[in-house]
Image: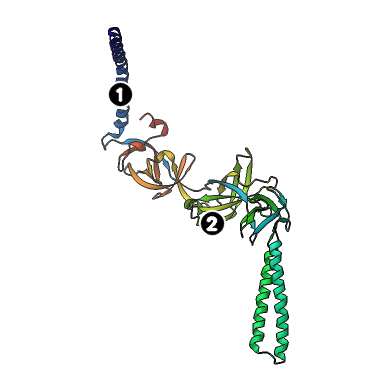
Amino acid sequence: MKNLYISKKNACSIFKLALLSALILIKPLLIDIKAADISNQNSLLSVASKPLTDAIAVTVVNVKQERRNQIIRNSGRISYKNEMHLSFKTAGLLKQIKVEEGDEVIQNQILAMLDLEEIDAQQKRAASNFDKVSADLNRFIKLYDDELVSLQVKQNSQSAFDAAQAELQIANFNKKLSVIRAPVNGRILKRYVESNELLQPGQSVFLLASHKQGTVVRIGLIDQDIVKVEVNDSATITLDAYPGRVFNGKVSEVALSTESTSGTFEVEVLIQSEQLALRSGLIARVEITPALSELQFYIPIESVFKADNGMATVFLLDEDKKLAKAIEVKIIAFVSNEVAVLGALNPTDKIIKLGTPYLIDGRRVKVVTDSSFSRE
């Protein structure tokens, strides 16, 4: 036990010595890092802390005011322009399904039907009742003409005839809609039920896509973008499923109100592709080129000093007083190495490009070239 105690004590002493040695080695490094940090801070502050009478070296460029077609980018899912859910009007037992998912169908082709035993019985009952009240009406009309019954009896018979006729029409209509036929030429995208299932009225049986109107991409745009888009604006579509291929399209519909869930405006882009049938559900990236473009100001991205919540501070050059004038602008979009902005700018203004981190409103400046700025 005594030897064990001595070994533990020695191990503790060795650990303390190792820790002290490590601190001795690291301390010079920490001193160097701190000195370098102080040096960097001093170099940055050396310009900013100059007296206000000293001019800060800056470079300037002219503000651009141009009309440019700003591309609007978004993504969405491909779908057929006209997709419809097919169902039965009445409840019943599904007797037969004649098509599967992916099948091509033609107009008026039978797709599915209910067991018609109950529906046929309802139709026969309505037809039998109609024949009875029709005969009664003819008999009461003759009796009324012979003044053997009152006008009220004749009118009651007419009312019973009208009701029976309506019931027969309903029964015939329900039997007609107990068979699902293809309303247009198209493709079965989804089948939701199986044979011998008991269906409710209006329960979806198929999702049918019409070939007539082609395929579309639906995307959601924010308010700043939706005001730039018009019907028939050109667009390009790319898909990960077809790398390297670019599909042309055009804007076919523009929503007038926002969707309640997303708060965006839906835009529909019709894909102009006749050679390739695109599958519904594929993810597509869309770039819309608006035909209409606004007159906007463009400034270098280096001119943006501070930006927050879509607003930015920039500095204009007061050429007479050689002062920097700070103004706020609204950022519209980043375009390559420029920023589209709105604000109190004029086409004749000169905006400070390099040197903005050292400026405050009203600071004296001196204009230098880009090459000489780095030496200042």
Query: N-terminal of the two: label 1 or label 2?
Result: 1
* 180 sits to left or right of 366: right
Residue at image coords 41%, 33%: 370
Q: Residues within 10 Å of mark 2 (few under 14, many from 20)?
A: some
Depth order, front residue of 147/335: 147
Instruction: Identify the image quadrant of the N terminus.
Output: top left
Q: Is residue 79 visible?
A: yes
Depth order, front residue of 75/131: 131
Which element type, helix, strand or loop, lies under badge 2? strand
Q: Amino acid at mark 1?
A: Lys
The disc placed on residue 255 is 2
Q: Which residue is mark 1?
A: 34
Residue 305 in the image: x percent, y percent?
37, 40
Residue 153 in the image: x percent, y percent?
65, 86
Q: Residues within 10 Å of mark 1 (few under 14, many from 20)?
A: few
Protein image colouring: rainbow
* 152 sits to left or right of 294: right
The disc placed on residue 113 is none
